[in-house]
Structure formats: C-alpha cells, structure tokens
Amino acid sequence: MTDVHARLAELGLELPEAAAPVAAYVPTVTAGGLMHVSGQLPFKDGVVMTGRLGEDRDLAYGQEAAERCGLMVVAQIEKALGGFDRVERIVKLGVFVNSAPGFTEQPQVANGASELMEKLFGEAGRHARAAVGVAVLPRGAAVEIDAIIAVK
C-alpha cells in the first residue's frame, strides 16, 4: 500500500478533519470486510462547495468538488481505521452530482474523485463507480460521494 500521507504531500493536498454526521447516521460502518462510508460533501476552506453543474457551475468546479469529496472519504477511512494499513482496496464510489436539466457530464465530474483514489492508493484505488445526476443535494452541495472500501 502506498503511503497516503506522502502522496497527499506530493500532490499539494491536505487531508481535512473527518466531518461529523449532520443527521441520524454514522460516518462509517464496517461489516463483512467492507467499510461503507456515508455520503461526504465537498469542503473547501471549511465551507461546502455549492451550486448546480450546467447552471451556475462548470465542469472544472465539479471536478474539484468531487476531489474534495474524495478527500473527505479518505479522512473518514483514516479516522475509522486509525490509518491506512488495513485498506485493501477502494471497491466502489457512488457520485451524486447536483445537475441542471440537460447536464450529462457526471462521469467527467466523478473523475475528480476517481483519479484522486488512484493517485493515493495506486492500483488498489481503481474502483467500480456510479455517477448520477440529481436535482438537489444536502446544503446545496455541488457533489456528494459515498464509498465502499475492502478492509483487512
């Protein structure tokens, strides 16, 4: 497994503090060798990145928001496991994109998180994925991502 913190530093990225739940759920659940990470929002400078892709936000903004969601997923993994030694593989990402009618670039938005996972975890970061356009997300977020992680 790659050293995730070293890779973050090489990329000029910092792992944010894992976000606390905002409703009646827990951030992660591990069962049967799989960790399920609840939906994570894109935080930049402590503020949620908001907006609707194809309306008031462009593709580049969406990709950055997806990357920020990916960083939050990684922060939740570290908090739950106390590090990354038990991460076997990123199995799947579910990417929800706040989309205007007619916006169809959800897969390209999702690449912001998918590419991050591969950069941080190498081959173990390659994963299955869904990229879905939705009408609205919590707190007006531009993107929300949940994840399934195989753990040792």
Image (cartoon, rainbow, N blue to C red):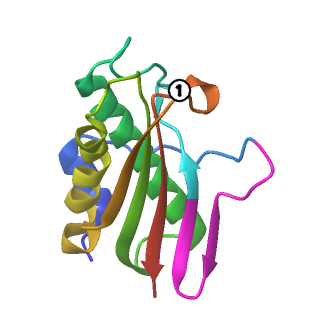
| Residue 62 at x, y percent in the picture | 33, 30
Q: Farthest right residue?
A: 24
Q: Check disc 1 and give the amino acid type.
A: Val
Q: Mark 1: which secondary structure?
A: strand
In this view, the residue in front, 43 or 45, is 43
Looking at the image, residue 131 sits to the left or right of residue 122; the answer is right
Quadrant in which residue 97 is drawn: top left
Looking at the image, residue 40 sits to the left or right of residue 96; the answer is right
| Residue 63 at x, y percent in the picture | 28, 34
Q: Quadrant of the N terminus?
A: bottom left
The segment highlighted magenta reads 23-37
In magenta stretch: residue 36: yes
Q: Label 1 belongs to which residue?
A: 48
| Residue 66 at x, y percent in the picture | 36, 40
Looking at the image, residue 17 sits to the left or right of residue 95; the answer is right
In magenta stretch: residue 86: no
Please report the residue visible at 81 percent of the width from the left and 51 percent of the height from the top: 24
| Residue 52 at x, y percent in the picture | 43, 20
Residue 109 visible in this rendered orientation of the protein: yes
Residue 142 drawn above or below residue 16 = above
Residue 15 visible in this rendered orientation of the protein: no
Quadrant in which residue 90 is drawn: bottom left
Residue 29 drawn above or below residue 145 = below
Q: Residues within 10 Å of mark 1 (few under 14, many from 20)?
A: some
Please report the residue visible at 38 percent of the width from the left and 11 percent of the height from the top: 56
